[in-house]
Each structure stands twice: as structure tokens, then as C-alpha cells.
Amino acid sequence: MERQVPVGYAAALLASFLFGWAITPSRGAYSDPAMTMVVLGTLVVGWRYIVDFKGRLDVIPARVLAPLVWACCLGMAFTAYNDGEIIIYPVKFWETGRKAQGWLLIALIGYLPSMLKWIEPRGVRHFRFAFVAVCIWLAGIDTYATSPTPRIDVWTVQQQGAAALFAGKNPFQEVHVGDTGPRTAADVPYVYPPMQLYITAPAYKLWSDVRFAILAAAILLGYAIRALATRFGAKELPAIIEDGPALFIWCTPKFFFILEQAWVDPVQLFWCSVFILSAAYNRRWLTAVLAGLVVGAKQTMLLFAGLIGLGLRFDIKQWAVAGSVALSTFLPWMIWDFKAWKHANFDFLSALPVRPDALTYITWVRRKFNVEIPYALAFPGAFGVALLAAWKSKKTLGGLTMAAVAAMTVFFVINKWAFANYYFTLLGLSALAAAAALGDSQEPEKSKAS
């Protein structure tokens, strides 16, 4: 019998591909080519969101899909290899990074035999994936050596926050750095939730650079997504199908730009991936704990964890566990100085003006028609999409995760700013949804954390 793959897998990977390409032309700032990719990605996500309500399982032969996934991975990696400005604040040539990219391309070519019906030993598949991970790790380390002090407030905020923590001071009180965006004020506080401090502080202590924690999270993210695909039977499919969701993240053309700039999104994506993986293994209480950690990872992640929890029909005890875990990540800082914490994590961000260079529909409409769309529409729009999906959509992990992608997409593309890191989050969540979609052919209750 010919092996089949749910169409939801292909649709989610296509969305991931398009959101990754949206970053490529202008590094996540507004441009018309980038906006085209955003429109296409939104359409794919919206189409899949609507189709999932029907509960019909459409499939595609694995032999047809595998070459397309492989070509996309090669195309993205080749684009990154030829990108002379993938690192934008270099102090030296990115030599090791370029060599690692070359070895990555060779490793990708190594997937070809499995698409020609050669049955690979399981060990070969594990080794090749580990080799790709090593290439990413080496290129990531050289990214930091090549760009040791990126001129972006994201990195400075995290560095100063970790330094304040080890000095026994409150980062939410102490950190005030210059805004490297359009604003000229030196008032940017530690805008990330405390969870980011807990993750990056050890890297700062050991290597004097918080970005090593972000690189580690990116590697673990790939492994978690691959484990999810394996859980849903991908080891019986061509290797590129099993590894594809992780490779779409690692091979996206601006991956090392994301790492250079110290954007925190690989960390929250890692928590999302282990959250969904736990649900796939029906670990009820662990899933609730991880839901709380996802909420604690970044302010916008409440939307993701909340939708999944509603879709999985968390009971009152699970919600209590998730809420307690999330609160515990914030509570010490709320007690220490509630006002400073609230200002850094909420008030400051809420007061920031609309960015004229943001890659959003708001920017497009303003530029083309000189009309302002209220960015506040993002909130009811995103929560409406999430609640409708939790109530009506089919209850597989693939359907729920793709619905979460839809909600996050609405929240980002109709808001006052969205740049490279936001679309990296969308491409990562889409890749996670692809791996989860491999379980769509199973009975819904097998995908529930209950």
C-alpha cells in the first residue's frame, strides 16, 4: 500500500516556507516583495484553518511530496549560502559559518537515496540529522564570533538584564538602553518576561553572551519537532518527511540573522514544541506544566497555550496547574517591584508608537491608500479565531496547532509592528503544526492530553 501524508502537513510546511521568505528580501522590514509572501502565507494558513472545520482527511502520496520538501530545503539553504549579508554586523569573515553551510548542503543532498526507495537503516537517519544539527551549531557559534556586539537593543537589553541579575539587582529596575529603532530615547527596559532571564543568564555567566542559550534552544527545537513527527509514524515515511519540519526552521534563509540579532523567539518556540510533544504522548500533567511555561515565555504566548488547552479540553485542575506555573515565573518580580515589572513587560510596549516600516497589512494599506487601520483589531480578531477553533475545529493536534498558527498570524499581521522575529515565530509554529499534522489520520482522542 502506498504511503500517504496528510495534506495538513504539506499546507503547514508551505506556510512555514512563505513566512521564511517574507523575512528574506528586506530582513523583516516592509517591502512589497516581502508583503507578497505575507499575503500568500496568510492565505495558506486561512485556507487550512477553514478546511480543518470540515474534519475531512485529505492525503497526498509521500513519494510525490518528498521531492518537493527536499527541493524547498535545498533552495532555502542555497539562498542562505549565497547571502553575503546574512550577518550584518561582522568584524571578520564568517569562515566557519560558510563551511558549515556547505556541509549542510551536502547533508541535504544525502536525503536523495531515501527518495529513490532505498531503505535506510534507522541509524543512518539519526546520524544525518545529528550532522545537520552540528552544522547549525558550528555556524551559530561562528555567528557570535563574527558579530560579537550586534548593534540592536534586543541584545543589549538581555546582556544588561543578565548582568543585573548576577549583581543582585532587579533587571526590571536597572535596565534602560537606547532604542535602535526609529526612536532615539534611551528608555528601553528589560521588556522580556522573567523566563528569558532564567534561560539566558547561565549562558551569560559561562560565555558572556546570552545568545548561546538562544542557539541551544534552536537546536533543541529542531529535535523536539522531529520527535513529534516520529511519534506520529514518520519513521515509516521518507526521511525528508520526518526531518522536514525541523529543516524548514534550520534552513530558512535568515536563520543566522535571527541568531545574530539575539531575538528570543527560538526559546518560546522550543517551549511550544515540547508542549505539543507532551500532548502527543498523552502526558496530562506534564502538558499542563508546559502550558504554563509557554505562557511565561513571552507575552503573546498566552494565545497559543490558551487555544491548545481549550482544544484539548483541559479540566479545572489542569488549568490550575498551568496558571500556577505561569504565575510562578513572574511572581518573584511582581513581589520585588510590581510597578517596575509591569512597566517593563506591559506598559512600555503598549505605549510604543506604530512602526512605519513594519511588515503588516496596516503598513500596506497606509502606503497604498493613505488609510489607517486600527491595530487594536488584532486583539479581538486573534482571540476570535482562537475561540472559534477551540469550539468547532476537529480536535487533532495538527488541527489545533494550525489553528493556533492562524490566531497568531492574525495577531501579528494586523498590529502596530511585526518584523523578522515575528515571522520567524510564525514559520516555526507552522513547522510545528506540520509535524503535528502527521497525526491527523489518528483518532482525535489519541491526540488529546487527557
Image: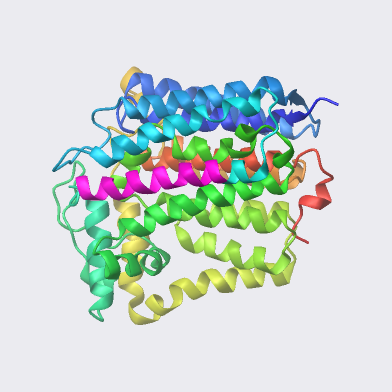
Asked whether residue 416 appears in the rendered view, the answer is no
Residue 23 lies, with reference to residue 135, above or below; the image says above
Above or below, 391 relative to 161: above
Q: Main secondary structure of the magenta part?
A: helix
Q: Nearer the viewer, residue 138 or 120?
A: 120
Q: Where is residue 132 in the image (x, y as percent from the top left)?
A: 47, 41
Occupied quadrant, residue 246: top right
Residue 6: horizontal and vertical position, in percent? 73, 31
Disc count in the image?
Answer: 0
Residue 37: % across, % down: 45, 23
- Whether residue 432 is visible to the viewer of this picture, yes or no, is yes
Q: Eyeballing the image, is 294 above or below 366?
A: below
Magenta range is 127-146
> What residue is drawn where x is 54% and y is 30%?
15
Rendered-image quadrant of the N terminus = top right
Assess whether residue 354 is covered by the magenta stretch: no
Camera-side residue of 410 and 304: 304
Q: Is residue 37 left or right of residue 53?
A: left
Residue shown at the point (35%, 53%) measured from the top left = 350
Q: Quadrant of residue 97?
A: top left
Give the x, y percent position of residue 332: 41, 79
Residue 251 position (above or below residue 326): above
For the point 64% across and 51% down, the residue is: 307
Of residues 114 and 350, which is closer to you in this image? 114
Using the rendered view, name the quadrant where residue 83 is placed.
top left
